[in-house]
Image (cartoon, grey):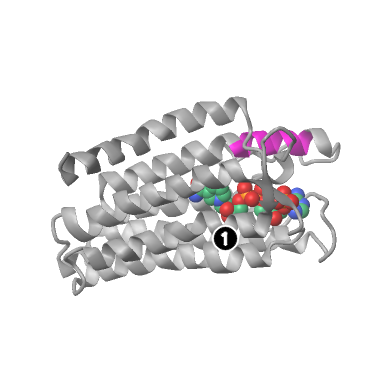
Amino acid sequence: MDEITFYKICLFSLFAFAVIVYFSLLLIPAPYGRHLRKGWGYTVRAKLGWFIMEFPAFVVIIIFFFAGNRQTNIVAIVFLLMWSTHYFQRTFIFPFMMKGGEKKFPVVLIVFALGFNTLNGYVNGRYLFYYSPVYPLSWLYDPRFIIGTIFFISGMVINLHSDHILRGLRGSAKNGYSIPRRGLFKYISCPNYFGEILEWTGWAIATWSVPGLAFAVFTFANLAPRAFTNHRWYLEKFSDYPKKRKALFPFIK
Ligand code: NDP
């Protein structure tokens, strides 16, 4: 099989996985964090789990940048910086700032996430740094790039700020849950997921690419069902949970 055929299969698989993951997670919440439960095999410390599963997302794109033919293209470098900034934080900072880090994380989820992050890094990196038409410098002034980048940066700020608020709910030794009330939590139960979806939607627009779209669709498919499950969980756990708060999209759902 030649590489372009292999590549197309990988790209198609991302969309297929998104559909499978969306409907599976509506039925069976991923067993980590507040939904951790017995029966999912071996577990490791959550901090270690997050580091291991996010590492390929950080490193694979860099490998394909150097394996490609765009090392001196400014737009390609900007895309690499956008992606790497997100995944540097997620791999090297987020896991080590988690509170309640004695919590466990199932190995089966780590294996799934490792596979996904490798596939997604290949599909996006190979396209941007090899298969795509070369992005001219003027792409940086294109409305698609500007709007996409505004979405990407806003999404990242919302995601980081929301995760920061959640960390603030826990003392260093505590492992319990309380109602978050600051920032976008006033409107939705999962603003960190909303930020993440906004970020990768911005990526799809800024790169104006099918691989970028595949990642945005997958992110929605992965996080929307969990946001709905988390929202129901909050309502069941806290009798004083704000009734007007939505799950994922302010004022909508
Ligand atoms: P959660 O919101 O479930 O948890 C984030 C952290 O906050 C965890 O340490 C959690 O503890 C803690 N926490 C959550 N709610 C409360 C609360 N009410 N009171 C006290 N502490 C709380 O997010 P995830 O763990 O699912 O995701 C973490 C990050 O990874 C997010 O930024 C998310 O967007 C991103 N992500 C991205 C995915 C993608 O497809 N791109 C997929 C999954 C996550 P505990 O672990 O003990 O529950």
- Give the total of numbered labels: 1
**Badge 1: few (under 14), some or many (20 or more) residues near its Cα, within 10 Å?**
some
Amino acid type of the residue that numbered disc 1 sits on in the rendered structure: Phe
Residue 25 visible, this angle: yes
For mark 1, give the secondary structure: helix
Q: Does the magenta stretch include residue 233?
A: yes
Q: Which residue is drawn at 50% across and 31% down?
A: 22
Q: Quadrant of the C terminus?
A: top right
Nearer-the-camera pick, 237 or 3: 3
Q: Identify the image quadrant of residue 133.
A: bottom left
Q: Relative to residue 53, is residue 73 drawn left or right?
A: left
Residue 62, position as x, y percentages in the image: 34, 66
Q: According to the image, label 1 marks what residue?
A: 51
Residue 180 visible, this angle: no
Q: Relative to residue 90, is residue 179 drawn left or right?
A: right
Q: Report the predominant secondary structure element of the magenta stretch.
A: helix
Residue 111, position as x, y percentages in the image: 52, 45
Nearer-the-camera pick, 187 or 228: 228
Compared to residue 172, the image places residue 8 above or below, namely above
Q: Which residue is drawn at 41% across and 66% down?
A: 84
Q: Relative to residue 2, is residue 51 drawn left or right?
A: right
Residue 123, position as x, y percentages in the image: 30, 49
Q: Quadrant of the N terminus?
A: top left
Mark 1 CB near ligand 1 (8 Å cut): no
Q: Identify the image quadrant of residue 217.
A: top left
Residue 117, position as x, y percentages in the image: 43, 50
Looking at this view, name the residue that lies furthest to the bottom.
Answer: 72
Q: Does the magenta stretch include residue 122?
A: no
Compared to residue 119, the image places residue 182 above or below, namely below
Which residues, given as a range, are shown in magenta? 226-235
